[in-house]
Structure formats: C-alpha cells, structure tokens
Image (spheres, rainbow, N blue to C red):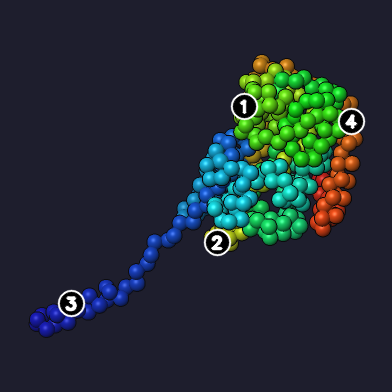
C-alpha cells in the first residue's frame, strides 16, 4: 500500500467514525410520591404498583417518600398544583372546601362496608367526569390508583357502647361523619392520623376514629387506650393516589396502557394487606383493650341521621354552583348497582 493510499484510507475511516450519530442515554422517568406515615397495610397497594411499573419499564422509577418528607399531608394538593412532586396521596378530609364534589365519598353510611365492593364502587365514582374535572381544573391532578379505607371504629379512653355515650366526648372523625356524631353531643376535632398516639395520650382526643384494624394498630393508638368499639362501622375519609396531569401525560405509553393491570394489582394487594392486618391486630387489641360491641340497634340510630346530612351537603353545594345533586345521585346508583 502506498503512503497516499494509506492516508486516504485513514482519513475516510476518521470521517466515517465522526459521522456516526451520538445516541444519548435514555432519560429515566421518575415520580416522587408524597405520602404521610410509614409503610403499612394502606400503602401495600402502592408498593405493589411500584414493583409492577418498574418491572414493566426499567427506565421508570416510582420514588415513594414517606413521613411527609416532601410535603405536609394537608398541603399535598397544593404541591401537586405547582408541580412540587409528581404524585401524592390525597385525603379529602385534610382539604376542606378544596375538593367539594369528591366529598360525596365521605357522606356517612353511603358506601358499602365489604372491602372488595367498597373498592369497586369508589373507583367507579372517582372516575365520574365531575370529579375528573374538579381535580384537573383546580389542582392539575388526576386519579391514579384507588386507596379505599376500611370502615372506622373509635379507640381511646372513653367507653362508647351507645349513642348517648357521645355526649361531650372529644372525637376525631372527619367531615359529614363527624356531623352525625355531633348530633348526639360529640365534639369533633380533625387531627392528622400520625398524631393519633399523642392526641389520645395527652387527652386532646377522647376517642380517635381510624380504619379498623390496620390504622389503629399502625399508629399505635391501642398502646395509650383502654377501649375500642366494634360494630360502629362508620364511613371515613375519601382517599386517592393522584398524579399531576403533566406527569401522567409524560409517562411512557406502555405504562399508560398498563393502567388497568396496575390498578388490579394495587387493589388485590391492598385488600390482602387489610385481611393480613386484621389477623395481626385483632388478637393484640383483644389482649390489651376492652372490645366494646356497638349494637346494631344503636348503629341504626346513627344511620337514621344520614339522610339529613346528605340533604344538607347537597343543598349547600348546589347553592355554590356545584353539581352536587348529579354526583350524589350517581354515587347512590353505583352503590345500588353493585350491592
């Protein structure tokens, strides 16, 4: 090979290499998820969804940040709105007036108590266009995963076995459910769940309402209590796992297409976690507390007060220009169709 031929070949090789396009590494999609408390039965659905999504797309990361480290629970909606994080848990009771139509899910004795049915009914209602619009337009948010709560019981240092026992009792229960107990003399106060132990221990709250059994166990309320009700089975908070609209829109299409399967895995894991929690906590409660039955005849007195609470909620929100009648009628129909 002549020198001239060699140089020509060398130069062509360099040009060929220089013309090869430089492919940038794929950008990882990461969601920071704001949630209160620590990992517990309530979060097992979310933890399962994380595994499913990250396995389906290794370039996606769902970073679940516990302990209000990203935001206080009462400010999660505001955080979503400004894009401080991509996703968060939202408990309607922590945001009075901010999601008025979503509050239909907190109306007392409206929803079924069976876990699977409650989960199904809540999911259907949360996807109604009225709620979708409320979340999107007000908070740049969208319903991502369901996170239904079991029915509430009351645990603390005041013995509750009948409706007359509520008189003068400082009770932690949110929204319309608290309104019913208030009719019987209770003094409702909203305290975030992670503050349950301290609130009961210091006597700030006489009986603390939380989902039975898992939450009362997870927040160690039994350690500073003497009594727990069984049979009260009241409704409680409306909870959703939300993402920002922007984060959802930017999600890889294959994960968007998987949403039905992701939700199924979430729901199955959540229901199983609640059942497992009952097996753990019920024997502990039985050893450490007096389990006080709340008779059906007494519960019926509470149920009888539900309709006036529904009517008041409907009337007040209609007066504010919200489609309360439409969403309430829809919710009642969904419950009837699935019972």
Q: CA distance from mark 4 to mark 3?
A: 93 Å
Query: Where's residue 318, x and y in %?
Result: 85, 54
Q: Secondary structure at mark 1?
A: helix
Disc 2 versus disc 3: nearer the observer:
2
Mark 2 and mark 3 residues within 8 Å of each other at the beta carbon: no
Q: Secondary structure at mark 3?
A: helix
Q: CA distance from mark 3 to mark 1?
A: 77 Å
Label 3 sits on residue: 10
Between discs 4 and 3, the one toward the N terminus? 3
Q: Image point 62% across, 20% down: which residue?
A: 223
Disc 1 versus disc 4: nearer the observer:
1
> Label 1: few (<14), some or many (≥20) within 10 Å?
some
Label 2 sits on residue: 250
Q: Image point 65% across, 34% down: which residue?
A: 193
* On-image quarter of the C terminus: top right
Q: CA distance from mark 2 to mark 1?
A: 41 Å
Mark 1 and mark 4 residues within 8 Å of each other at the beta carbon: no
* On-image quarter of the N terminus: bottom left
Between discs 3 and 1, the one toward the N terminus? 3
Label 4 sits on residue: 301
Q: CA distance from mark 1 to mark 4?
A: 31 Å
Q: Please state the total of marks drawn on the protein image.
A: 4
Label 1 sits on residue: 198
Residue 8's tag is: none
Mark 3 and mark 1 residues within 8 Å of each other at the beta carbon: no
Q: CA distance from mark 2 to mark 3?
A: 45 Å
The residue nearer to you, when weighing 146 against 79, is 79
110 sits to left or right of 131: right
Between discs 1 and 4, the one toward the N terminus? 1
């Amino acid at each position: 090979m002549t020198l001239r031929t060699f140089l020509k070949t060398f130069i062509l090789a360099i040009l060929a290499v220089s013309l090869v396009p430089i492919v940038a590494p794929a950008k990882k999609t990461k969601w920071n998820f704001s949630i209160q408390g620590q990992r517990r039965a309530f979060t097992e659905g979310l933890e399962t969804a994380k595994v499913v999504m990250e396995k389906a797309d290794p370039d996606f990361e769902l970073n679940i940040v516990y302990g209000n480290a990203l935001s206080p629970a009462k400010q999660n909606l505001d955080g979503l709105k400004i894009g401080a994080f991509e996703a968060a848990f939202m408990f309607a009771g922590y945001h009075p007036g901010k999601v008025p139509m979503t509050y239909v899910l907190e109306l007392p004795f409206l929803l079924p108590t069976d876990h699977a049915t409650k989960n199904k009914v809540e999911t259907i209602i949360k996807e109604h266009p009225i709620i979708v619009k409320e979340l999107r337009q007000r908070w740049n948010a969208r319903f991502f995963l369901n996170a239904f709560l079991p029915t509430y019981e009351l645990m603390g240092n005041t013995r509750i076995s009948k409706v007359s026992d509520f008189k003068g009792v400082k009770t932690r229960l949110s929204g319309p459910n608290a309104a019913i107990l208030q009719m019987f003399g209770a003094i409702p106060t909203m305290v975030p769940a992670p503050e349950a132990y301290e609130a009961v221990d210091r006597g700030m709250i006489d009986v603390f309402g939380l989902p039975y059994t898992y939450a009362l166990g997870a927040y160690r309320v039994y350690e500073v209590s003497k009594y727990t009700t069984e049979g009260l089975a009241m409704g409680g908070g409306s909870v959703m796992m939300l993402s920002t609209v922007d984060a959802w829109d930017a999600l890889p299409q294959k994960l968007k297409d998987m949403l039905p399967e992701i939700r199924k895995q979430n729901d199955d894991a959540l229901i199983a976690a609640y059942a497992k929690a009952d097996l753990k906590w019920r024997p502990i409660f039985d050893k450490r507390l007096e389990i006080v039955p709340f008779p059906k005849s007494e519960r019926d007195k509470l149920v009888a007060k539900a309709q006036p609470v529904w009517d008041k909620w409907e009337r007040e929100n209609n007066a504010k220009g919200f489609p309360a009648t439409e969403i309430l009628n829809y919710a009642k129909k969904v419950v009837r169709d699935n019972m």
